[in-house]
Amino acid sequence: MPETPPPLATADFDFALPEDLIAHAPARPRDAARMLVVGTAGLTDAGVGDLPGLLRPGDVMVVNDTRVIPARLRARRGQARIEVMLNRAEGGGVWHALVRNARRLRAGDVIAVDGTEGCAATVIEAPEGGAVRLDFGPDQAALAAALDAAGEVPLPPYISRPDGPRPEDAADYQAIFAERPGAVAAPTASLHFTPALLAAIAARGVARAAVTLHVGAGTFLPLRAEDPRQHRLHAEWGEITEEAAGAINAARAAGGRIVAIGTTALRLLESAVDADGRIHPFRGLTDIYLLPGHRFRSADLLLTNFHLPRSTLFMLVSAFAGTARMKAAYAHAVTARYRFYSYGDATLLERADDRATLLERADDRATLLERTA
């Protein structure tokens, strides 16, 4: 009989986090951040600089090469002031966007972008909920110039910037792998890498493959449903080229491990993996939602940051490494004063094997039944 998934409740992924553990600036240098290793043998306090020694010759490190664009814009519809967060390019100058005061917008409205020479967009669609579709016209160079002139780095809301992003945020919130513009949030695990760290990893005999997932603004949206399965992720555009898929599969076939750098790389890999663990080329949208009970078939290790309570990403890492193990890891991180979120410290997670996952599912079910009794 197949294992019946346990019930899920958003409240079961809550934890207390002191506000002073939220990082508002990155470690300098980037690879000076701390790193908590969460393995089947327990927890180990380490540093990001220790990563090369924890990898093996023949492993392949999968990174996300998306580049963050200055996606937050101030705009006006007549006298009404509007904040626009570009979310996903749909082609031909059309963007899916999240807009504050969207209830005031109607199809056909024209909004003018502040601080630009005539940059404007026509509202194509403005359904309930703040998500809209905007047509900026076919001149992509003009839009790119407008973003450079007036766009702001779309820092997460938990990074305090009362006066707006600082000049250094433009570099701090951009990963060393960033090449393909399109993201409105950084793949933050990649923020820890430096040229020196990459050289040490290469010297260790670890290969690197780049994939692309343009992280959308939906990553900032809170999870409000009591049952997390009722939540829906915004679709994001991703690509795994034939070359990248081949390199990843070759490493696995030769006995190497797949090391996903960040949850974005992991989500894309899981969107393209088959039942035998083989990665296929992929190009298109994915809204894959990874919750406890999901059986991972791609990555063996995951490097990621510390995530928000009650968030889809904390649920993802719980699915990957085991819920009980991740709750213990986060409790230790709070006690040991690790720094949390985008500019914070890192975790290196070993994927839970099937047996451990099933045991933790049973433990989770017992806990949930006790909580609801």
Image (tube, rainbow, N blue to C red):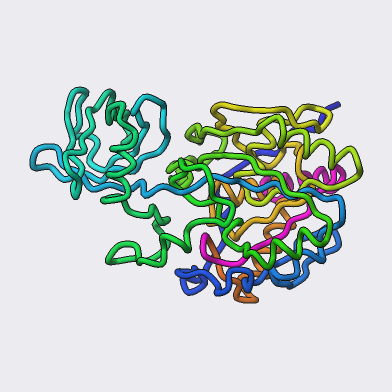
Is 19 placed left or right of 290 in the picture?
A: left
The residue closer to the viewer here, 204 or 270, is 204
Residue 201: where, in percent of width, then height? Answer: 76, 61
The residue closer to the viewer here, 261 or 137, is 137
Residue 55: where, in percent of width, then height? Answer: 82, 59
> Which residue is drawn at the image coordinates 63% and 62% (left, top)?
193
Quarter of the figure with residue 295: top right
Is 49 placed left or right of 186 in the picture?
A: right
Quarter of the figure with residue 1: top right
Residue 181: where, in percent of width, then height? Answer: 47, 43
Is 355 placed left or right of 265 in the picture?
A: right
> Which residue is drawn at the image coordinates 78% and 38% (left, top)?
247
The residue closer to the viewer here, 14 or 113, is 113
The magenta stretch spans residue 178: no
Is 210 placed left or right of 175 in the picture?
A: right
- Name of the residue lying farthest toward the right: 254
- Note whether 230 is above or below 152 in the view shown: above
Residue 12 seen anywhere in this rendered image of the structure: no
- Name of the residue lying farthest toward the front: 141
Residue 66: where, in percent of width, then height? Answer: 53, 44
Q: Which residues are magenta?
A: 342-370
> Which residue is drawn at the image coordinates 58% and 39% (left, top)?
212
The magenta stretch spans residue 363: yes
Residue 167 seen anywhere in this rendered image of the structure: yes
